[in-house]
Image: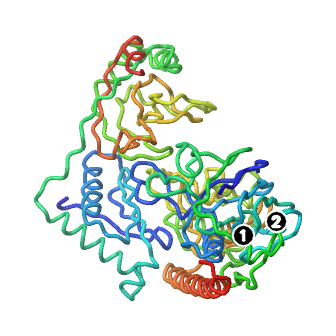
Amino acid sequence: MNLRVLQPGLLDTVQDAGRHGYQHLGINPGGVMDRIGMYVANSLVGNDPAEAVIELHFPAAAFLLDAPAMIALSGADLGAMVNDQPVPINRPLVVSGQSVLRFTRPVSGACGYLAIRHGLALDSWLGSYSTHLPAGAGGFGGRALQKNDVVPLRLATSYNAVLRQQQVAELPWTAGTGELYGAADRIHITEGSGFALLNAHAQEQLTTSSFAVAPQSDRMGFRLQGPPLKTEHKAELLSAGVPLGTIQLLPNGQLIVLMADHQITGGYPRVAHVITVDQPTLAQLRPRQELRFAMIAPDTAEELLWQQEQRLLFLQNACKLRLEEWLSHYGLH
Amino acid sequence: MRNTTFSIAPLGDSAIMIEWEQRISPIIHAQVMQAFHHLQSLQQPYITDLIPAYASLAVCYDAAQIRQAVKRPARAWITSFITQALQEAGASTAAALPGRSLEIPVCYHPSLAPDLATMAQQKGLSEEAMVALHTATTYTVYMLGFLPGFPYMGTVDAQLVTPRLKQPRTQVPAGSVGIAGEQTGIYPLPSPGGWNIIGRTPLRMFDANRADPCYCRPGDQVRFVPVSLEAFTKLLS
């Protein structure tokens, strides 16, 4: 049972929740850009929420599933079609063998996630399936998916009773993700140590100005286009560890937000940090889309994180119950 | 770690930053490494990553897991955990774990050292004198970053200090040894880069298939040993 790449996309990689515990060796965690997308797609098909998924960017790859499978798409809506029939995101789908899955248009969001029930049969590297492109390790051969790649799947199930001659069956429930994402005009941040270096006007501009995601943004970082932020005085900083979501001030006054494949250390002022809860909302913005920042206290950020975690757990449990009920109805597991 | 002061501040909502006096010094770095080793030895499962650098240690943690387990705000908990751990480390009379001593062969042949001649000319030194200066110092690996296994080492002799290239190269070969400011480093993988390249090591600084993929660790003491082009080629195979 395999997933074959019929046509490659812009950047389709295997990702999971990231490779943790090796940053002191210069090995960055990587992982999905939008952890909610991964979490929801996996939950819908009954996988562990952090199971390896395929992250897709438009134009995304076309795949052939050579055996019947249960799949789910989440994150960006990239106009998915199974055998030329449009299929929704955030819903479990059962597809027949020899189905072609392709993505026709970027409807909303930037990073799509494809989860397949029981997961991908790949080897992990340092405890993670995330693709580390510079290291050429993890994921599928340490690289983005290319034409004719064959990604083996863990387990085949017969869904004949479900499909009954159909090519796609949509399971009768949808994961509501509305409350999980925030709004682009209110990306919450907490103060960084470099905030104090900004002059009073720039401190104000950080939360009153509109910024646009620059076209040269990628999985490493989102460059923002906005008013140049001025510092009170020039600071020479020693390089230090920088986590996901750190907003660095470049010498030209522009900002860069560190995304999934970011470098581990940086020497630019850390003016602020995008809160964990809003990182997926930011990750789903496309080049030229605009955003605004809203400053909150670190304790509030943690409170929001806790609430999001509860919502995700609730969603996972709800998916699990529906799926178990549905599977047992068809005598599947 | 006695009589040393550090500060702890939030670094986003899932990490905190421990900072010592902000300067490049082997003494300060030894304190960073002592804290790093001590925290690592505690194997606290909620701590997901430790990132030591010149004069700081970033501690990444799983806020949701902590909150779930201790039923109170994660940041307050981790801050007191770290403060206590660092006090323990500071109170212990045990000497800090010394870094490993590594000898790294480097070939300074012009064919592998595109910037050596230019630098020598700028500084009014012979290429031999440049190599002698580069190999005379035992360097501390202050941190790894930029690429997996890329060691930031310091500090080079004042005569070798050179700013980064104005125009970074699009491709620097793996093993290239460079100088940027007062630091020296080794590209573990082929990569674009702006360091002044003065030689190349035949060692594989990074190999994903090794149990220890990265050749260097933070705190290592590194000495460069000059080798001929013949020896370099031999060692490569």
* Mark 2 secondary-structure assignment: strand
Name the residue carrying label 2. Answer: A80
Q: Amino acid at mark 1?
A: Leu
On residue A123, which mark appears?
Answer: none
Left or right of B207: which side holds B4?
left
In percent of the image, x 47 and y 28: which residue is there? Answer: B176
Tag 2: Cα neighbours inside 10 Å, few (<14), some, or many (≥20)? Answer: many
Same subunit: marks 1 and 2? yes
Tags 1 and 2 touching, CB below 8 Å: yes
Q: Residue at x 84, y 68 (%)?
A: A107
| Kind of residue indicated by mark 2 | Ala
Residue carrying label 1: A73
Closest to the observer, A169 or B158: A169
| Quadrant location, the C terminus of chain A | bottom right
Above/below status of A225 relative to B174: below
* In the displayed structure image, the side of residue A59 where residue B217 appears, left or right: left
Can residue A101 be seen here? The reply is no
- Give the image location of residue A1, x and y in percent: 65, 57
B32 versus A196 height, above or below: above
Q: Quadrant of residue A282?
A: bottom right
The answer to which of A181 and A121 lies nearer the viewer is A121
Which of B209 and A322 lies nearest the eye of the viewer? A322
Chain letter, disc 2 residue: A
